[in-house]
Amino acid sequence: MEAEELFDKHAAMVYNLALRLSGNPADAQDIAQDAFIKALRGLPGLRDAALAGTWLYRITMNVWKNRVRSEKRRAFWKTFSLDRGEEDGDEPPALQIASPETPADKAMENADEKATLEKAMAALDPEDRAILLLREIDGRSYEEIAGITEIPLGTVKSRISRAREALRLRMGVLQNDNGT
């Protein structure tokens, strides 16, 4: 597989993963760029081109983990948004209404739920959040997640279970704090 083919085929996937992990486009671009630089260095050692996607997932995850570790003091991993690109201080995430026919009260309710979910996800351990995103957002199998993260299959299953439970608890606490 050539470098250009690798980039053309997987650039969107790598960027989207980096965006979901980091929570903002600037950091996602940096992570994606670093991941592709590492991938290009390791490309001659890639034996099976069919596994390039999983291999790039693993590289992207590792670049993100290293970044979280190195930037922990600046609270890099605490900012997480599903629909807002930049951290704007205390402002809530931008409201995006999918359909013009959505009633205003339903849209506000959805925005509140999304904000609660974002806060709950941000409170999770970064690695648990990453594994949960791979499973719930990307729809990856447990086996794929184990391969991507280089964590044993049983550990992946238990961490996803614990992350789901922690998310449920945090959602309940945040909803109660908001008076809902």
Image (cartoon, rainbow, N blue to C red):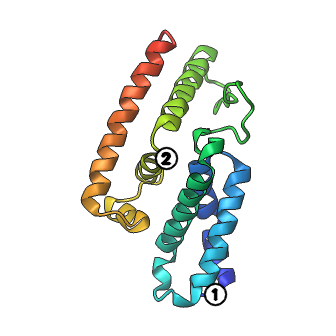
Q: Is residue 23 above or below residue 69?
A: above
At 64% from the left edge and 16% from the top edge, which residue is drawn? 104
The residue drawn where x is 28% and y is 62% is 153
Give the alpha-carbon distance from disc 1 to disc 2, as whole Å: 33 Å
Identify whether 153 is placed above or below 55: above
Q: Earlier in the sequence, mark 1 or mark 2?
A: 1
Q: Quadrant of residue 33?
A: bottom right
The image shows residue 178 at horizontal and vertical percentages of 52, 13
What is the secondary structure assignment of the residue under circle 2?
Answer: helix
In the picture of the structure, the residue carrying the numbered disc 2 is 126
Q: Residue furthest top?
A: 179
Q: Amino acid at mark 2?
A: Pro
Name the image quarter holding the N terminus: bottom right
Residues packed near mark 1 inside 10 Å, few (<14), some (14 to 19) or many (20 plus): few
Number of marks drawn: 2
Q: Is residue 43 left or right of residue 143?
A: right
The percent coordinates of residue 9 (x first, y second) are 61, 73
Q: Position of residue 168 (x, y in %)?
A: 37, 30
Image side of residue 126 versus residue 81, left or right: left
Residue occupied by mark 1: 2
> Given this view, does label 1 or label 2 mark the residue nearer the observer?
2
Give the image location of residue 99, x and y in percent. 64, 31
